[in-house]
Structure formats: structure tokens, C-alpha cells
């Protein structure tokens, strides 16, 4: 058993609320530790520390800020095994997948090493007689990030790396399900040379989130999690005068055209549908084969693959996927599977009875595959966030295209085809933020930006890429004229350049 508190002013602290949440091992169902749930006073202490440290950090030249990230990247690599083990033990994903989680965050840190270039400004010489005009990007001050359980390494780094590189102080409120890695990342940032107070980690639940959303000294909030909470955070942050970017849930479709390489498509569906037990916002949860023949051939290929998925605890190096995160998540997924059967979908692979000897209390569900799913069913409308893939048969391309177009969510989508025209048409017309052409999980790399459309995202700037530099800075535009360019006498009409 271990007890986690917060990370404030460069060190671990216990917190003052007296409230804690249990941390489970998803593979065994056992409580392995507790995490403190912050009080308003804990959050206020983090803000005070951030406020004291931020001006000096903002005034630190960008090359020095970049060097902290150079060192941090090295420390992430040096500590990769320890971080992955810590992550898997609380999340349940396989060690390889946990390393991917860390590496995808590390890549954002590599991207922000370019901050001296990324934060450069615009300058116009001679915008008017003797007038120069320039725009500079200054840090917003104190930023906050609220993150979900499913990527406890990557998503905190999506947020704190660009925020801190731009000269802000940052307060991270990670998921209470798997809080160990975020605290360790903060420790490693200090080891990399970050001054105390620039990165604080405040653990907690709704109470801590509300304290962040209403604190007058926090200027910008980044959120990733489920759609109802994203909508709430966006609205509350905006009401309190904060800049906000909030990313929510997903229901990602993959269209399989009759000309697609079906072996490639089936492999892609298995990895993208069942990897990380389906607990990825970019997981493929709906397969849309076009035409009866494509559908029948695809199902024939998928069934034995789903049946032979290797499921195990993270300590099983050969496991394809692990358990889902909590008992509540397991129960929610099971009740959605039941609703699919009741509403008439055909459960062609039924993983509900999967049991693993020695791990009977773990939150395991075997891979499930539904055929004949229709858009009115709950398993189609709802984000299941588990190892369940739904096949919706479409008669033709237009019908297939209309499914993700009409769906509430708009995070990711993919098309499998050998026809360049179809792929181009699809990428152009689809109303979804991230599109894969023969790529099942089109998560953009760190130097492009990540974000969905429709109910998958609220706000107008994405995660990482140059969008993140814009989100974590505000523009100041300076117009300057020196005495030699100034005419005598007062000017009463608005100056124009005519
Ligand atoms: P969640 O919404 O339950 O929790 C996210 C964060 O919000 C956590 O830090 C949690 O403590 C906090 N929170 C929970 N309830 C709250 C409340 N009532 N008021 C204020 N804050 C609250 O999400 P989760 O279960 O941790 O993560 C899974 C969800 O995240 C899925 O819907 C998934 O699609 C989504 N997700 C989206 C993206 C994306 O980029 N769009 C990426 C990863 C995960």
C-alpha cells in the first residue's frame, strides 16, 4: 500500500483535506494505494507557488527553457522502464503500450525544444511614417490541465510541455485512477532543472476541478476526458473568464471499401479496436464494411482473430490487452453489451465469460464482436470505451459516409481503400477532426495538432503543434514611433494609411 499526496512548490506534500480515493490494481481488483483529494486550500497553495515562480520563468530566455526539456527527454528515456511499470500497474495496459503512452508525450517535449523558434514574433518595419509594428506572444500566466485516466503519461505532457515552454506556470489535476506517473513526471522536471512552483500536481476529484475553474489567478484551462465533463468544464471556465480547450469522447468509424485489402483492414481493426482494451479516444469502435460481400468476408476474418486475443495482466509480456480500469467501468461495459443483445444486434464473439486463473477479481472482459448493429442502438450511439467492436453494414459508399457524418462525435475516422478518388472524396467531405487513409488510429504527431470536431471538442485550438503555442500565449501588438517621426500638433481624426 502507498499513499500519494500532491506535488507543490517542487516537493511531494500530503495535502490537508483528509479525503482520499482508492487506487486499484485493475488486474487483481485489489486496492494498492490511496491518493489525496485536494481541498481548496491545497489548490490555493499550488497557485501561490506558481504565482511566485512564474515571472522569473517567463523572463528566462527561451533557449534556457528549451534546455530543461532536452534534459527531461533524456530523463524520460533513462526512466522508461520504471515509468511504464508504474503506469501499467494502475491503468492495466500492457508494458509495451505504456511505453507508447510515455513516448507519445516525450515527443511533445521534443517538439517544444524548438520554443525559441516557435515563440518568435512578427515585425513590420515602416507600417506608417516612422512607425514600426510588432506582435509578441507572451505566456498567459498560470495554466491548468485536467486529464483522463486512459493516457496518464501522454496527455499531461501534451499540456504541460507547451504551457511551460512558453513561460507559464502550470497546475496539473490528473485522473485519480492512475496518479503516480504524473507526480513522477513533475519530479523528473525538477531534476531536469525546472524551478520549483512552475509545475504543480494537485490530485483530486470534482472538488479540485471546481477550485481550478473558479480560481481568479488561473488564466487558461485545458481538459481531456468524457464529453459531459468537457462541456461542463468549457462552460464553467468561460463563465469565469478563462480561456479553455476541452476535448471529449468519441465513436470512431472505419469504412472498409470493397476494394480494400481485407487482411490489412482486419489487422487494423483488431489493433485499433481491442488495443488498450478499447480504452482509447482514438480506438475504432465501429467497422462499416461497404456491400454484403465485403461484410461477410470481413466478419469471417475478424471472428477467429477476436476469439484468439491474448488477454492478461501487464506482467504477461505476450498479452495483447489487459483489463479495463475499474469495476464500475467493467459493469458499464457489460450492461451496454447486454443492451446490444436486447436491441437486436448479433453478438458473434461473446467475451463476457472470459476468466483468468489467479485473477478472478480483475476487471477483465474478453473481446466482443457485434454484427448487424444499427444506428438506433445504444451500443452505436454511446461511447463504450471497452473491448467491443460493432459492425454496421452499409449498402454503398454514400450510406457508409453518412454514418460518421451524422454521429454525435467527431474525433477520428478511417477509410480502407485502394481507390485514391474515394479516399480523397472521403477526406474532403467528412466532418471529423482526424482522418486516416489506410491508417486506423490517425493520431497526429507532436508537430501537427490533435483535436476532434462536434461533441468531441469544445474550444477552437487543438492540443500540441503550433496550436498549442497559440493556446498557451496571448498576443500583444506594439505600435512604435520615435520622436524624429512625430509631426508637431495634435491629431483628432483616427489615423489611416490612405
Ligand atoms: P472523465 O471525464 O471521467 O474524467 C476526466 C477528468 O475529469 C478527471 O481528471 C476527473 O477527475 C475529472 N472529473 C470527473 N468527473 C468530474 C466532474 N463531475 N466534475 C469535474 N471534473 C470531473 O474521463 P475518464 O473516464 O478519465 O477518461 C475517459 C474519457 O476521456 C473517454 O470519454 C475518452 O474518449 C476521453 N478522452 C478523450 C480524448 C480526446 O483527446 N478527445 C483523449 C483521451 C480520453
Image (cartoon, rainbow, N blue to C red):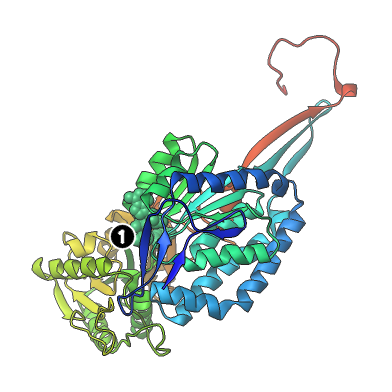
The one nearer the camera, 426 or 162, is: 162
Vertical comparison of 488 with 396: above or below:
above
Vertical comparison of 156 with 43: above or below:
below
Q: Secondary structure at mark 1?
A: helix
Task: Give the quarter the ligand 1 occupies.
Answer: bottom left
Quadrant housing the C terminus:
top right
Question: Looking at the image, which residue is at 36% across and 61% down?
Answer: 21
Q: Quadrant of residue 200?
A: bottom right
Q: Looking at the image, can residue 455 be seen?
A: no
Q: Is residue 389 left or right of residue 10?
A: left
Q: Cβ(mark 1) to ligand 1 < 8 Å? A: no
Q: Quadrant of residue 27?
A: bottom left
Q: Quadrant of residue 478?
A: top right
* Image location of residue 94, percent across then percent down: 42, 80
* Image location of residue 148, percent across then percent down: 41, 60
Question: Looking at the image, which residue is at 68% across and 59% down?
Answer: 194
Q: Is residue 280 left or right of residue 127?
A: left
Vertical comparison of 466 with 319: above or below:
above
Q: Residues within 10 Å of mark 1 (few under 14, many from 20)?
A: many
Vertical comparison of 322 with 70: above or below:
below
The one nearer the camera, 409 or 435, is: 409
* Image location of residue 389, percent across then percent down: 26, 73
Q: Is residue 52 left or right of residue 405?
A: right
* Image location of residue 361, percent across then percent down: 25, 79
Q: Which residue is mark 1?
A: 404
Query: Which residue reaches farthest right?
Result: 484
The one nearer the camera, 184 or 107, is: 184
Q: Looking at the image, can residue 246 be seen?
A: yes
Amino acid at each position: 500500500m502507498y499513499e500519494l499526496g500532491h506535488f507543490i512548490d517542487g516537493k511531494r506534500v500530503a495535502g490537508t483535506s483528509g479525503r482520499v480515493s482508492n487506487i486499484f490494481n485493475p488486474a487483481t481488483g485489489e486496492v494498492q494505494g490511496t491518493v489525496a483529494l485536494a481541498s481548496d486550500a491545497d489548490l490555493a497553495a499550488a497557485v501561490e507557488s506558481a504565482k511566485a515562480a512564474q515571472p522569473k520563468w517567463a523572463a528566462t530566455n527561451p533557449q534556457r527553457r528549451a534546455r530543461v526539456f532536452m534534459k527531461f527527454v533524456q530523463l524520460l528515456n533513462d526512466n522508461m522502464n520504471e515509468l511504464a511499470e508504474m503506469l501499467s500497474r494502475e491503468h492495466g495496459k500492457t508494458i509495451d503500450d505504456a511505453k507508447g503512452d510515455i513516448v507519445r508525450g516525450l515527443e511533445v517535449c521534443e517538439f517544444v525544444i524548438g520554443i525559441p523558434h516557435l515563440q518568435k514574433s512578427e515585425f513590420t518595419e515602416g507600417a506608417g511614417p516612422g512607425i514600426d509594428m510588432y506582435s509578441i506572444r507572451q505566456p498567459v500566466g498560470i495554466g491548468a490541465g485536467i486529464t483522463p485516466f486512459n493516457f496518464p503519461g501522454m496527455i499531461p505532457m501534451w499540456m504541460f510541455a507547451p504551457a511551460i515552454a512558453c513561460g507559464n506556470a502550470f497546475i496539473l489535476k490528473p485522473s485519480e485512477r492512475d496518479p503516480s506517473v504524473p507526480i513522477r513526471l513533475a519530479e523528473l522536471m525538477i531534476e531536469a532543472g525546472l524551478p520549483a512552483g512552475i509545475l504543480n500536481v494537485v490530485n483530486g476529484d470534482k472538488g479540485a476541478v471546481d477550485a481550478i475553474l473558479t480560481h481568479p489567478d488561473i488564466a487558461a484551462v485545458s481538459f481531456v476526458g468524457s464529453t459531459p465533463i468537457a462541456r461542463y468544464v468549457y462552460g464553467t471556465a468561460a463563465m469565469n473568464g478563462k480561456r479553455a480547450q476541452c476535448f471529449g469522447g468519441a465513436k470512431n468509424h472505419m469504412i472498409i471499401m470493397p476494394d480494400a485489402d481485407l487482411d490489412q483492414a482486419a489487422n487494423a481493426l483488431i489493433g485499433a479496436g481491442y488495443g488498450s482494451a478499447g480504452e482509447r479516444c482514438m480506438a475504432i469502435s465501429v467497422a462499416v464494411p461497404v456491400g454484403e460481400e465485403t461484410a461477410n468476408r470481413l466478419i469471417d476474418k475478424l471472428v477467429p482473430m477476436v476469439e484468439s486475443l491474448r488477454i492478461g495482466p501487464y506482467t504477461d509480456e505476450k498479452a495483447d490487452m489487459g483489463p479495463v480500469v475499474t469495476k464500475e467501468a467493467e459493469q458499464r461495459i457489460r450492461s451496454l453489451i447486454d443492451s446490444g443483445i436486447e436491441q437486436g444486434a448479433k453478438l458473434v464473439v461473446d467475451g463476457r465469460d472470459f476468466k483468468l486463473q489467479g485473477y478472478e477479481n480483475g476487471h477483465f472482459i474478453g473481446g466482443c464482436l457485434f454484427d448487424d448493429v444499427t444506428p438506433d442502438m445504444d451500443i452505436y450511439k454511446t461511447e463504450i470505451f471497452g473491448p467491443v467492436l460493432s459492425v454496421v453494414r452499409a449498402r454503398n459508399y454514400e450510406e457508409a459516409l453518412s454514418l460518421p457524418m451524422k454521429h454525435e462525435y467527431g474525433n477520428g475516422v478511417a477509410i480502407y481503400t485502394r481507390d485514391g478518388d474515394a479516399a480523397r472524396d472521403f477526406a474532403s467531405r467528412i466532418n471529423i477532426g482526424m482522418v486516416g487513409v489506410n491508417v486506423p488510429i490517425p493520431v497526429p504527431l507532436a508537430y501537427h495538432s490533435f483535436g476532434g470536431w462536434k461533441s468531441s471538442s469544445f474550444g477552437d485550438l487543438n492540443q500540441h503543434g503550433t496550436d498549442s503555442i497559440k493556446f498557451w500565449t496571448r498576443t500583444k501588438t506594439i505600435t512604435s514611433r520615435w520622436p524624429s517621426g512625430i509631426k508637431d500638433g495634435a491629431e483628432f481624426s483616427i489615423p489611416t494609411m490612405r
